Image: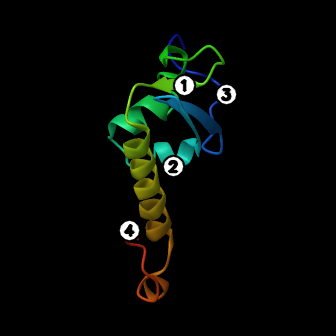
């Protein structure tokens, strides 16, 4: 496909340059919320159209700390959706 990659896997580690700070995030985490902007960007449909820096990392012109907060939230959301209810009640997955 013209815009998408053909060797896309949920376990891919995406290296992202966010405002000069580098993050490594699994594709599955970035695309966890179906219908979201991040899911659209990192689902693989636009893989060949993503803006990249000189080292080939995906580049996003965003506040790096805000992006980290979003990734942390996605990780907690993903984790909480995978846990059985009995375990969820025993631990706190809310922000620190």
| Image depth: mark 3 or mark 1 in front | 1
Give the residue drawn at x 60%, y 43%: 10
| Up-down relation of residue 74 to residue 13 (above or below) | below
Asked which secondary structure carries label 4, the reply is loop
Dot 4 or dot 1, earlier in sequence: 1
Question: For the residue carrying disc 2, how many other residues have a C-alpha within 10 Å: few (<14), some (14-19), or many (20+)?
Answer: many
Residue at numbered disc 3: 7
> Is 51 situated above or below 20?
above
**Could you tell me which secondary element the residue under label 2 belongs to?**
helix
The residue carrying pointer 3 sits among few (fewer than 14), some (14 to 19) or many (20 or more) residues within 10 Å by Cα, namely few
Q: Position of residue 34 (x, y in %)?
A: 37, 45
In terms of sequence position, does the residue under pointer 4 or pointer 3 come before the other?
A: 3
C-alpha distance separating marks 4 and 1: 27 Å
Task: Give the spatial CA distance, label 4 vs label 3.
Answer: 34 Å
**What residue occupies the far top of the structure in this picture?**
2
Q: How many marks?
A: 4
Q: Is residue 24 left or right of residue 31?
A: right
- Viewer-proximal residue, 34 or 89? 89
* Image coordinates for residue 52, horizontal then vertical, percent: 55, 17
Residue that mark 4 sits on: 95
Q: CA distance from mark 2 to mark 4?
A: 17 Å
| Corner quadrant of residue 81 | bottom left
Front of the two marks 2 and 4 = 4
Q: CA distance from mark 1 to mark 2?
A: 15 Å
Q: CA distance from mark 3 to mark 1?
A: 17 Å
Q: Circle 1 sits on which residue? A: 58
Under circle 1, the secondary element is: strand
Instruction: Give residue 29's mark.
Output: 2
Q: Nearer the viewer, residue 43 or 16?
A: 16
């Amino acid at each position: 496909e013209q815009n998408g990659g053909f060797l896309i896997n949920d376990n891919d580690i995406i290296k992202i340059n966010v405002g000069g700070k580098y993050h490594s995030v699994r594709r599955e985490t970035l695309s966890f919320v179906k219908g979201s902007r991040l899911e659209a960007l990192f689902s693989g449909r636009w893989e060949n159209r993503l803006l990249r820096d000189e080292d080939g990392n995906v580049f996003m012109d965003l506040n790096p700390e805000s992006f980290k907060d979003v990734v942390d939230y996605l990780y907690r959301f993903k984790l909480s959706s995978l846990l059985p209810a009995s375990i969820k009640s025993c631990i706190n997955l809310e922000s620190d």
